[in-house]
Amino acid sequence: IRLLTILPGNHNDEIMLSLHQTSLDTRPTPSYEALSYVWGSPKDPETIFITGSNELWDIQVTRNLAVALRHFRYTDRPRVTWIDAVCIDQSNLDERSSQVQLMGDIYRLAPSGVIVWLGPEEGSSKYGMQLLEQLSSKVEIVEPERFVPSAQSQRDGTWADMNQPLPYQERELFALGGIINRPWFTRVWIRQEIFLASDNALVLCGDCTMTWNNFCKAIRCVYAKNTPAVLRQFPIQTRWFRENEDSLVRICELARKTPFTFKRLRKAQGYSDCKDPRDRIYAVLSMVYAPEQQLGIVPDYTLSILHVYRDVVRRFMGMGDLDLLAECRPTDSSWISWVPDWSQFSRSDSLQYAFLAGGPFLAVSRNLNNDDILSISGVRIDRVSKVFDLHNLIDYNYGSFIKMIRTLIPSDYAQMNYATGGSAIEAFVRTLVTEQLEEICHPPALGPPKLLDGIRTIRKIIAPGNEAIQYHDFDDGEKKFISFVNTTMEDKTLFFTSSSPPLMGAGIQSLQPGDLVCAFLGCERPLLLRPIENSKYRVLGPAYLCGYMHGQAFLGPITAPFRVVTTFVPQSGGDVFGFLDTGAGRFQIEDPRIDRLPLD
């Protein structure tokens, strides 16, 4: 690798650097710091100078990097760093590919640590950093979501009490928002860079410095204060949490040091930015679980974006895993429909859970005559017959929610049964929130709404004589359900199938009557397919289909004493579905229906 030495100088002096080559295999590892930063706009670049043996040449870097170099430069001694924009020849695709393979080791082995550059001081950023440093000194984390007062704040336990608000008004909240919404947090590569960093990583914002561990501790404390007890009493903080929740969640995710699954990393990327779409794959390779690191994905910038993405899907198929097909969305004919186009920004998927629609089976798949056609094994469940685009019926004043329910549900719906069992209203409730319910979590989670609150909400709306019902007529539990529906269905279409009685589900907005709902071995969700010519189909995307999310298409219904629940399993990197024996109170991953199969 190349290491960069920032030669000493005053703040306004020309930026002078030198480069030298070394090896990460050298022992001891050469001393250097690795910089994690945002490249910034290529417009209006700044010239910096590199000295060699009797030579001096200039290169252009983004203004954001130039500002960073001026802040890092010592006045009295050199500083050795690794910075991708300078230490890698970005125009040489072969060098870029080989160096990207080493980036995991570069950040992991940096003896002097990783430096996170959030950018120069702006507005009230200095005050925001001071608030975070102060908060980090007030609390300690003893469990993932449990805080206790630090030694210096034993007399004031309110800092660590999650039912007590932070002593912040608009000025403080504005300053914090200015920190957590900086561009650095939205860059794809920073996830790997800070994930691999040692415990001595530092955060710099202007001239303010604090350790990454303290920064994350303070942000996690801020996020943990987002409790009903706080939000009910303090409207200012309620509004701030609503506006900044995504940023807080993103930083809490960055604080995690255990490996992720590739699917979880893809989901966590959300609206993350990257200059090259291939980096949406390459930037996470050093963070995934060991089995997925064995897939053999190697950075190669000479390959097209489609080639890179298709290769990833194929490698997972080779493991019997079709889950990545659930990340597909409608594309034009120039793109292969069964390959997700990860270069496109997409709203974070509101099907939060990893379902088991394909059962506990591995995929059976093969390519046909060419690379563009895929053959996979599954079951056609039903055909879409009616579609309701809810986008224009949902708003955050909730008045249209009532109109939507009355439009979709007849008053006698309360007496109807659903096709796979249970009441039709219960199925409707499950569909509207795509099964994000308190009861499905084990142990029960406080975040999602309760099933009974959803049922009560629907019954209240469609009850004869309740035509004049208003939002204020609902209790807190019912309002939570309505809020979840607004969020969940914001980017979805409600649909009913052609069977009698019909199934109901939720899918992409471009869904049409005649599209098929299918379940495939090795795929966690049902997929929506659109028939084209010669018995071929295009993949449209995933669906929620009530009654078919847990392997029922292959194994039949789940019977007592078992019911499906989701629980957090650290080894899997997130929530997984399993089966709760309600009689014994025992949770198991193994599907109890397997024992009924006529297998040797």
Image (cartoon, rainbow, N blue to C red):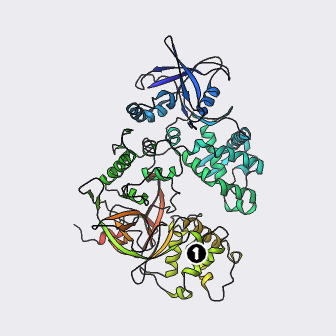
One can see residue 449 in this view: no
- In the picture, which quadrant includes the N terminus? top left
Q: Amino acid at mark 1?
A: Gly
Q: Secondary structure at mark 1?
A: helix
Horizontal and vertical percent position of residue 373: 29, 58
Q: Is residue 597 left or right of residue 504?
A: left
Task: Residue at 45% x, 34% y: name it.
Answer: 103
Q: Is residue 55 left or right of residue 298?
A: right
Horizontal and vertical percent position of residue 242: 66, 58
Residue placed most toward the observer, 554 or 571: 554
Q: Does residue 519 lie above or below 121 as drawn?
A: below
Q: Does residue 89 lie above or below 345 as drawn?
A: above
Task: Residue at 54% x, 82% y: name it.
Answer: 409
Q: Residue 15: which quarter of the image?
A: top right
Q: Does residue 262 lie above or below 405 as drawn?
A: above
In the image, farthest residue toward the top: 54
User: Label 1 crowding class (10 Å Cα cut-off): few <14, some 14-19, many 20+?
Assistant: many
- In the picture, which quadrant includes the C terminus? bottom left
Horizontal and vertical percent position of residue 122: 71, 38
Instruction: Name the residue carrying label 1.
Output: 454
Residue placed most toward the observer, 306 or 140: 306
Horizontal and vertical percent position of residue 456: 60, 79
